[in-house]
Image (cartoon, rainbow, N blue to C red):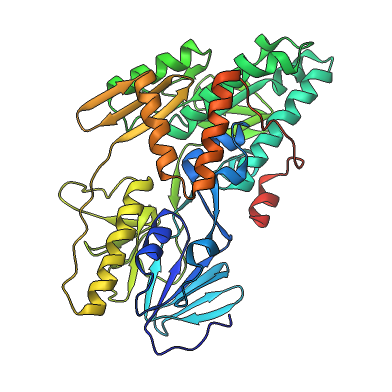
Amino acid sequence: MNIPDSQKPRIVIIGGGFGGMNLIKKLKKTDYQVVLLDKRNFHTFQPLLYQVSTSGLEPESIAYPLRKIIRNQKNMHFRIAEVKRIDTALKKVRTDIGDISYDHLVIATGTRTNFFGNKTIEENAVWMKSLPQALNIRSLMFENLEKANRTNDPVKRKEFLRFVIAGAGPTGVELSGAIAELRSNVLQADYPDMDISEIEIHLIEGADRVLPPFSEKSSAKAQKFLEDMGVIIHLETFVANYENNRVTTKGDLTLDTATFIWSAGVTGASIEGFESTSLLPKLNRYKVDVYNRVAGFEDIYAIGDIALMETEDWPKGHPQVAQPAIQQGKNLGKNFINMEKGKDLNPFEYFDKGSMATIGRNKAVVDIGKLQFGGFFAWFIWMFIHLWFLVGFRNRVVTFFNWTYSYINYDKAARLIVRPFKQNKIIAEED
């Protein structure tokens, strides 16, 4: 890897997401050698991926170069690498570009899409965990609209114009709302010779309400927003399969569609090399103590979505969203500084800042403690928070400009097919 030898203790961090990035910021100007490994050279603001896939934002708006975060820091190094295995006995990380030893190891690999063992859905559906995948959805959507516009076959046109989303968590709800807004505000002008009313948006959820983690009040409000926008919601419905452009469920519902987006769950992006005492196999999350140390190890840590810390307030672990990762990254950074100074470590305490989801223009829901907001005020809070946590001044300015432009003109500027749609297997290999 061409990492210079050093007498300083080496911290290897795997993953440049919210957890890894906030940890790195805390370790600047410390007496550690810090090595960041990631298979991409940028940090992705994942909460806004759905806006890239629905042409609301360009990918550059929500991506930030990892090297820019560590530049001018002589104690920090970055390598693009895919980690294959952790050799805990030899204290080495084995990657596709070579091996690297560590004194301290931090795993911040986040999650991957969970298909619950259904290989057919994994091969045929599209999903959205990275920028290439979000762009792939955008290409598929607009390619299908073009196909619908030129076909004379009413059955095929219906397949091209029906969008089906599995999973009514924040991602599924936000995707459904964004597609509905695209239909109402943009596509009629872009396709004047096509009957836009033929476009259908179906949202399928196994629970008895949308946004199951939210309060019942916010769930009901989000469902009403979606239904008012023309989204067809199927609750207590489980997808069984997707093959040959047909979605089948465990009930009577069958939908023929050329666009099936899977957003029904995630699982930890674990790495080989750990026993079941450290890795919880059903969840693919590492069991950690209050200092984020992986069970059975004093020198290996896990933060963010990949870590499961059982506490009195959070017996099933913290939610797999950005805030726990951000806060754990900062706390672990402080603890590395405390180690350096011979001070006691600070146990992690999660401050729940609430949950939020946007459904569309002037439509959002926010849960903060016992308070629930909906409508324009919640939408304004959602916009402010997401702008605040975007990395980089340029990204905030560009995103704010795009949102302002879209709000004033009822338009989305990024309706581009920059590359043809590719099957998931090819995208996963490239990604």
Q: Residue at x 28, y 29 (%)?
A: 367
Instruction: Quadrant for residue 163, please give it.
Output: top right
Q: Is 218 situated left or right of 399 in this image?
A: left
Instruction: Quadrant for residue 274, please give it.
Output: bottom left
- Quarter holding the N terminus? bottom right
- Quarter holding the C terminus? bottom right
Q: Is 315 situated left or right of 15 in this image?
A: left
Instruction: Quadrant for residue 419, please give it.
Output: top right
Residue 379, percent across and down?
40, 25
Question: Viewer-proximal residue, 59 or 207?
Answer: 59
Residue 326, percent across and down?
35, 53
Q: Residue at x 61, y 73 (%)?
A: 96
Q: Is 82 situated left or right of 196 in this image?
A: left
Evaluate whether residue 388 shows in this view.
yes
Residue 86, percent across and down?
45, 74
Is 327 drawn above or below residue 234 in the view shown? below
Evaluate whether residue 238 shows in this view.
no
